[in-house]
Amino acid sequence: MSSYPTLRRRDFLTSLGVAGSAALLLPRSLRAAPSDQLKIGFIGAGGWAQAAISGQVEQHYVAFCDVDDERAAKTYADHPQVPHYRDVRKFLDRHAAEMDGVVITTPDHAHYPLAMMAMEAGLNVYLEKPMATTPWECRRIAAAAAFHGVSTQLGTQGHAMEGTRLLREWIASGVVGPVTDVWLWTDRTQKRISIWSETLAEAEPERDTIDWRAWLMDRPYRPYSSQYAPQVWRNWWGFGSGAICDIGMHMFDAVRFALDTGFPESVIPEVSGVSEYTIPQWANLRYRFPARGSHPPLTVHWRNGWKGDVQNHPSGIPHVPDEVVRETKNGMAFAGPEGTMFIPDMRVSRSPKIYPEAREQEVRANRPAKWLPRVKGGHFQDWYNAIHAGRSGGADFAYGAALTEQVLLGALAERSGEEIRWDAASMTAIGSPKATAMARPERRDGAWQPTRELAAVLAKLPD
């Protein structure tokens, strides 16, 4: 779509008459020494990053960067030979030239400036989901990736899984008939870490082990609190967007891939306990999508959170017993006139279960043909293959930006409490100035700024 420019750096520099080294115009994969092993850096070394780091041992680790020494301590101890930094600028200045790519696994609010800095340094980027906290940031990340021509991947790991491909193939073959309704649900944000507040958190003394101003990145300053870091930042609008941009990113990826959904016509919210600062205690959303090709109009029903001691589960899903749904913390259901495909997971990591049972037996006896290409080795390996080949991953930043923006419309509905009817061309919520303002981040003066060349590309986007 026009909101996601495809102008490449080579074309732009040529149009400006800028003479530069041929090496600067080559993709990073072509500048690397030919080898199956890639040279990778990590921005984020504690928490979730530990799983990403421990799972990539076949690659060469160049350097780590984390603003919180305490969180990153185990990674540093496990890899004492790898240099580590608090300051991302030093990390990039000293090591960008020797790295093939960087993996970014930080709190959501830091994704935009970190991804932009990494791509400006010429690096291929794997970025954890969600891409960013606002549509404004998503558009700019996608534009920068296209401009620099780097290999990118958004961390929606289910996108590379076998089950996700089976889901699309089975829907296309009509195993339950045309899908008209999808239900998605999760127990997140979990009751045990739920925070609701009408004010900012009370200030606490800063820990010596954390560079708090660096943790804030380009967000306006607020005093340190353990209610923000290290783990509960996702509950605060200033740093995250709640459960829908956590677990919902995986689920809506499956919906988008299987049913070719673009932006919805509307998102209608019902929420409890939302404030200016914190996410709802529970949320019900209805995404309404128009007909698409052979697909009829679609309603996606989102449920998350807790009502007292009871998880906010959906009920009345066609063909699926309510007790089955209530036993599942995270689940998806794709309903058509002949049955419902049920996935008891946040990702389609296995073959869907079909209800009613008679229809399940019929499908198992006559399985639809497999026709989609499969991804060997998983989501990270897909990105590594893309770097070697000079292409992007299956969930690259063009795909990931549109997906994240789609999901963020639900966060805008939750936060504003208003129906969202999205004008993608102007990036405005029709009839909701409040939600329109929330589609752009509140950034600190003097925050990261793009180079002149990239700034000229970004200037063409809605602001």
Image: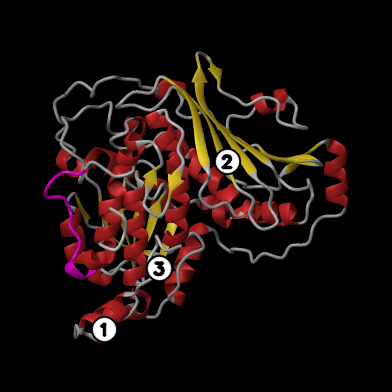
Q: Secondary structure at mark 2?
A: strand
Residue 14 got which mark?
1
> What is the spatial separation of the Cα atoms under label 3 and label 1, in whole angstroms?
21 Å
Q: Residue at x 27, y 62 (%)?
A: 458
Q: Residue at x 52, y 14 (%)?
A: 309
Instruction: Please name the residue that numbered disc 2 is placed on.
Output: 288
Q: Earlier in the sequence, mark 2 or mark 3?
A: 3
Q: Nearer the viewer, residue 241 or 72?
A: 241
Q: Is residue 179 visible?
A: yes
Above or below, 95 against 71 in this view is below
Q: Residue at x 78, y 32 (%)?
A: 319
Q: Are marks 3 and 1 in contact (CB under 8 Å)?
A: no
> What is the spatial separation of the Cα atoms under label 1 and label 2, in whole angstroms?
43 Å
What amino acid does circle 1 point to? Thr
Q: Earlier in the sequence, mark 3 or mark 1?
A: 1
Q: Is 84 part of what is drawn in magenta?
A: no
Residue 18 location, quadrant: bottom left
Q: Position of residue 204 (x, y in %)?
A: 16, 24
Q: Secondary structure at mark 3?
A: loop
Residue 451 location, quadrant: bottom left
Looking at the image, residue 398 sits to the left or right of residue 337; the answer is left
Instruction: Please name the residue that numbered disc 3 is placed on.
Output: 151
Stretch in magenta: 443-453
Q: Earlier in the sequence, mark 1 or mark 2?
A: 1
